[in-house]
């Protein structure tokens, strides 16, 4: 146990130490970053202020010189101007040389005009800004001079009444603008060409900063300081700033003090944490060994109790929380002894009650068997009664269906008979109309016979006329030959007409004979239709009587079917209730059987519990 507590304590100490170191690290990183930013800001502000001051001083001095020469400048000879240039060059050691640039682009130095060069045509910066934009008192962009170094120009306008006569350009070394401050900085053009540097990086002048330090390409304006370590191991913070003229100001601030101070504090926190953890572990180990010196005796007593030995054993006092545990163990021994004695008495009473329950359960099982047998007999009788009632109801229902079918057939037959009567009446009417039509046909046939007789008489007369015409034609000789031919044709036509008349007369006679027969047949059919109507009336009365009888039988069948269905429903309800009772009896029988089984299980558990209680060994009181 002591080992586990020590391990736990050491683990917790490690976690706390790691947490303290992590918090210290993050705090120191924040402090270091803030101090880096502050140092960079102070250095940058100081350098930029000095640069602005130096440039303003230089431009102010140039403007004073230009202002002094403004009066009468146009009347000065070239020799006078060259003399003044030499005076300007000697006036300040930082001035490399000076010259005048005129509006026409000519450039005058101390040794004369520069031949083959025109500032206007070359569009030099000082010319464009001075004459084109009318600026004065400004510093030009740095450029490489003839010796390979870097120079800048201080430009001031020589003007009077807003008329620029010339530009005074003083060439200086950019490094001369900045006094010695001990700070490290770099000024470069946007492409990285360095034209001004001081401190440890003065050797970078004339080189490209991105070639010297490629990692500076990832620095942007406004970024937090970029930490950079020099080859000799010193730490610098680097920031990128854009000047008003578009060039880049690189501020390199020495952060060696902040880095070393942060590391020293972090190492101190680590050493203090290790010392505290070690001391805490040692003190805890000694304290635990002293406080838990009687723990083995307590463990021994509890082990004996686990083996069933509850004999009282004295444990020395530890003067700490272990005494509470020892008192609890002693109380536990006494309480368990009481519980075991009471449990043994309860077990004896429980065993006797179990035997009584077993006898009662056996009697209940016998009664359940008898009840189940009686219920099954009643259920069988109720089922048979229900089946008989259902058969009666079914037969009555079938009889009702048959009666309804017969009633439907009789109704349909009555309707069919009625339709037959209607059709017979229509046939009788039609036959009467046909009889009239046949009579009219016979009358018209007789009229046709009279017309035929007239036609026949006309044919005979025509034949006689044709014969007379033929005789007259024969008398006429050759002159009547054509007329004879016509007479022959007329006679032949009259013969055919007479023959057709005879044929029509024969047909008319046959038609009249058939008309008389049809009239007689119609008269007979009319009599038969009268008899059929009488028979139909008798059948209709018979069907009406049958329908009334069948309706009476249907009502009786309906009453029988309804009563049988009610009896069957009641019988089924009785059968259902009996089945429910039978089911309940079955459940009671099963529950009683289960109760008996559970009682047996309880008896076994009681015996098992008695065996388990025998495990406890106690002093007999």
Image: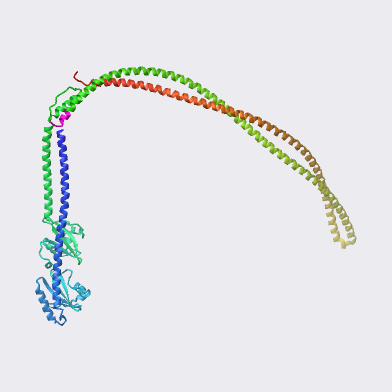
Instruction: Residue at 12% x, 50% y: name it.
Output: 263
- Above or below for 301 versus 362: below
- Above or below for 58 versus 409: below
- Above or below for 492 versus 207: above
**Quadrant placement of the C terminus:** top left
Using the image as rendered, state which of residue 391 and residue 231 is in the foreground: 391
Instruction: Decide whether residue 383 is among the magenta residues.
Output: no
Tell me how many marks there are: 0
Using the image as rendered, state which of residue 311 and residue 261 is in the foreground: 311
Instruction: Decide whether residue 323 is among the magenta residues.
Output: yes
- Where is residue 288? Give x, y as percent: 13, 34
Magenta highlight: main SS: helix
Tell me, yes or no, if residue 423 can be seen here. yes
First to last magenta residue range: 319-326
- Where is residue 30? Give x, y as percent: 17, 52
- Where is residue 147? Give x, y as percent: 12, 70
Q: Looking at this rendering, what residue extends furthest in the right direction?
A: 475
- Above or below for 461 versus 137: above
Horizontally, is 552 left or right of 270 in the view? right
Using the image as rendered, state which of residue 113 and residue 26 is in the foreground: 26
**Quadrant placement of the N terminus:** top left
Tell me, yes or no, if residue 502 can be seen here. no
- Where is residue 106? Give x, y as percent: 18, 78
């Amino acid at each position: 146990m002591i080992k586990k507590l020590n391990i736990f304590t050491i683990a917790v100490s490690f976690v706390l130490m790691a947490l303290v170191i992590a918090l210290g690290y993050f705090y120191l990183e924040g402090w270091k970053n803030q101090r880096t930013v502050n140092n960079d800001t102070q250095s940058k502000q100081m350098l930029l202020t000095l640069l602005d001051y130096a440039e303003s001083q230089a431009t102010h001095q140039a403007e004073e010189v230009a202002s002094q020469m403004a009066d009468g400048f146009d009347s000065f000879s070239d020799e006078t101007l060259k003399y003044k240039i030499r005076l300007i060059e000697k006036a300040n050691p930082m001035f490399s040389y000076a010259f005048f640039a005129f509006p026409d682009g000519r450039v005058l130095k101390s040794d004369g005009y520069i031949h083959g060069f025109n500032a206007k045509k070359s569009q030099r910066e000082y010319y464009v800004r001075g004459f084109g934009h009318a600026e004065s008192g400004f510093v030009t962009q740095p450029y490489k001079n003839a010796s390979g170094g870097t120079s800048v120009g201080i430009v001031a306008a020589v003007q009077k009444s807003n008329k620029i006569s010339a530009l005074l350009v003083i060439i200086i070394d950019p490094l001369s603008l900045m006094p010695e401050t001990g700070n490290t900085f770099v000024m470069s053009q946007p492409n990285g060409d360095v034209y001004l540097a001081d401190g440890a990086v003065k050797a970078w002048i004339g080189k490209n900063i991105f070639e010297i330090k490629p990692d500076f390409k990832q620095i942007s304006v406004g970024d937090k300081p970029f930490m950079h370590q020099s080859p000799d191991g010193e730490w610098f913070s680097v920031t990128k700033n854009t000047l008003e003229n578009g060039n880049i100001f690189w501020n390199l601030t020495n952060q060696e003090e902040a880095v070393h101070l942060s590391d020293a504090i972090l190492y101190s926190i680590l050493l203090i944490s290790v010392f505290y953890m070690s001391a805490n572990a040692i003190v805890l180990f000694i304290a635990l060994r002293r406080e838990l010196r009687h723990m083995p005796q307590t463990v021994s007593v509890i082990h004996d109790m686990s083996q069933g030995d509850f004999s009282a054993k004295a444990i020395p006092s530890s003067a700490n929380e272990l005494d509470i545990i020892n008192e609890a163990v002693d109380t536990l021994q006494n309480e368990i002894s009481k519980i075991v004695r009471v449990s043994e008495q309860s077990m004896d009473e429980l065993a006797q009650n179990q035997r009584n329950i077993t006898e009662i359960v056996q009697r209940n099982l016998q009664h359940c068997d008898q009840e189940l047998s009686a219920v099954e007999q009643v259920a069988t009788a109720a089922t048979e009664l229900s089946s008989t009632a259902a058969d009666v109801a079914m037969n009555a229902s079938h009889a009702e269906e048959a009666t309804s079918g017969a009633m439907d057939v009789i109704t349909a037959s009555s309707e069919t008979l009625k339709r037959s009567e209607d059709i017979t009446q229509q046939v009788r009417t039609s036959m009467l109309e046909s009889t009239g039509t046949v009579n009219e046909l016979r009358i018209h046939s007789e009229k046709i016979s009279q017309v035929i007789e007239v036609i026949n008489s006309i044919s005979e007369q025509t034949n006689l006329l044709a014969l007379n015409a033929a005789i007259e034609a024969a008398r006429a000789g050759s002159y009547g030959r054509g007329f004879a031919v016509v007479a022959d044709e007329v006679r032949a036509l009259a013969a055919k007409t007479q023959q057709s008349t005879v044929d029509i007369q024969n047909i008319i006679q046959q038609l009249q004979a058939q008309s008389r027969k049809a009239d007689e047949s119609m008269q007979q059919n009319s009599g038969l239709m009268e008899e059929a109507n009488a028979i139909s009336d008798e059948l209709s009365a018979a069907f009406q009587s049958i329908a009334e009888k069948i309706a009476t039988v249907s009502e009786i069948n309906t009453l029988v079917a309804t009563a049988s269905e009610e009896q069957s429903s009641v019988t089924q309800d009785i059968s259902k209730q009996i089945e429910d009772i039978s089911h309940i009896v079955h459940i009671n029988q099963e529950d009683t059987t289960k109760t008996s089984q559970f009682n047996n299980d309880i008896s076994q558990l009681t015996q098992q519990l008695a065996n388990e209680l025998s495990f406890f060994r106690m002093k007999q009181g």
